[in-house]
Image (cartoon, rainbow, N blue to C red):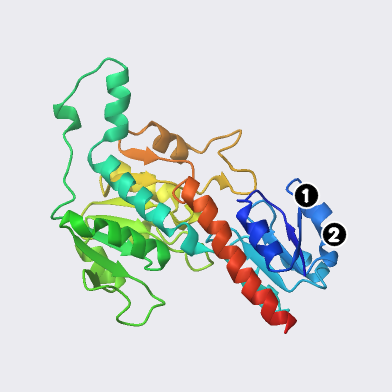
């Protein structure tokens, strides 16, 4: 089958697909419009975040059988409509779950130990030990919202810290968590957690999931970690809670103002809430790189190649 790779990814993806007998073309400078004109010539697409696969696009993709997303999030693809048209949609969260688990752990430690602020001060010639006194993870209750590949990887890495791990996942039946993680309702998690880490996809249901109501439902002030998608958190609500002391600190790998099609954040008029996060010593910010390691680039592509090969080979039978 003919496969079009529309974004940068590890060469192993093309190598494995071609080894499985498929024909691949790499076209990384395509646009929505140019791809719209060409897609009818292909059986499968490989995308990342640059091209939004909406209903209009899918209506033009008359021969498309499969769409592969290099990564975990599927919000740039109208999956429901694609599958109604008989187009299989695949992703590869197994490829970067280790990276996200490690990065989320690093964000937690950086937040508790004030690493970013202390580093900046030392580089400015300041040596303020008491002002940079940190917290220990041991003894804290870490709440994990969403216990798929990423949430489970984060929990695994925290297992040796002697903290209490609790999880909530609306879509998993009871018994999903290992024995070192307590499964709770969302209300119970909000009552117990000292730290909340978000590991959910961006959907209509999770858009602005973390708003005033979500935050105010917590019994005590807490720390927030987000390595999922920026728009899961309503930034205005987060900043207001930080100003009031309800949120003690935030470690964010993703921001709702990010433009995933351009790998950019902000704009000509940066929102006040984002400026607050940029200037606060109680934040740790990274540019959507939690799953962005040398190793994950290979694994994301390799996992997706194997899934697409299995899918396309089955369709040919």
* Closer to the camera in the image, 282 or 201: 201
Question: Where 32 sits versus 189, above or below?
Answer: above
Say which of 206 and 165 sits in front: 165
Q: Give the number of the disc on residue 30.
A: 1
Residue 1, horizontal then vertical, whole percent: 77, 70
Q: Secondary structure at mark 2?
A: helix
Say few, some or many: other residues with alpha carbon within 10 Å of mark 2 (under 14 / 14 to 19 / 20 or more): few
Say if residue 280 shows up in the picture. Answer: yes
Say how many tags the image has.
2
Measuring from the top left, give residue 250's x and y in whole percent.
33, 45
Q: Determine the image quadrant of residue 269.
A: top right
The CA distance from mark 2 to mark 1 is: 10 Å
Name the residue: 43% across, 54% down: 233
Instruction: Name the residue: 29% across, 40% down.
Output: 110
Query: Dot 1 lies on which element?
Result: loop
Q: Looking at this view, name the residue that lies furthest to the bottom.
A: 317
Residue indicated by mark 2:
38
* Residue 243 numbered tag: none
Residue depicted at 47% across the width and 50% down the height = 295
Q: Label 1 near label 2: C-beta < 8 Å?
A: yes
Please report the residue visible at 37 percent of the width from the left and 48 percent of the height from the top: 103
Where is residue 20 shown, x and y percent of the image? 68, 68
Location of residue 114 with respect to 214 vertically, above or below = above
Q: Which class describes the residues within 10 Å of circle 1: few (<14), some (14-19), or many (20+)?
A: some
Which residue is the extreme one toward the top? 125
Q: Is residue 187 left or right of residue 312?
A: left
Quarter placement of the C terminus: bottom right
- Above or below 23: residue 28: above
Left/right placement of residue 91 relative to residue 158 reads: right
Q: Earlier in the sequence, mark 2 or mark 1?
A: 1
Q: Is residue 255 visible?
A: no
């Amino acid at each position: 089958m003919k496969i079009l790779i529309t974004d940068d990814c590890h060469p192993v993806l093309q190598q494995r697909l071609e080894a499985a007998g498929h024909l691949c073309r790499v076209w990384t400078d395509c646009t929505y419009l140019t791809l719209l004109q060409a897609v009818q010539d292909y059986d499968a697409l490989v995308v990342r975040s640059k091209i939004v696969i909406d209903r209009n696009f899918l209506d033009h993709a008359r021969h498309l059988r499969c769409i592969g997303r290099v990564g975990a999030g599927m919000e740039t693809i109208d999956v429901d409509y694609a599958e109604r048209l008989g187009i299989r949609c695949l992703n590869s969260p197994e490829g970067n779950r280790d990276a996200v688990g490690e990065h989320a752990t690093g964000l937690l430690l950086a937040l508790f130990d004030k690493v970013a602020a202390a580093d900046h001060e030392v580089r400015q010639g300041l040596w303020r030990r008491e002002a940079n006194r940190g917290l220990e993870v041991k003894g804290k209750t870490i709440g994990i919202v969403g216990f798929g590949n990423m949430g489970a990887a984060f929990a695994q890495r925290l297992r040796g810290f002697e903290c209490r791990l609790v999880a909530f996942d609306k879509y998993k039946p009871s018994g999903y968590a290992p024995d070192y993680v307590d499964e709770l309702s969302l209300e119970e998690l909000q009552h117990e957690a000292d730290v909340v880490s978000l590991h959910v996809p961006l959907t209509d249901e999770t858009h602005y999931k973390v708003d005033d109501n979500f935050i105010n439902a917590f019994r005590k002030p807490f720390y927030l970690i987000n390595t999922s998608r920026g728009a899961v958190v309503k930034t205005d609500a987060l900043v207001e809670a930080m100003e009031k002391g309800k949120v003690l600190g935030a470690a964010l790998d993703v921001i709702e103002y990010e433009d995933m099609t351009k790998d950019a954040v902000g704009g000509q008029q940066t929102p006040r809430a984002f400026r607050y996060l940029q200037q606060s010593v109680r934040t740790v910010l990274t540019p959507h790189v939690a799953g962005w390691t040398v190793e994950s680039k290979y694994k994301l592509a390799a996992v997706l190649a194997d899934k697409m090969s299995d899918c396309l080979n089955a369709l040919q039978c």
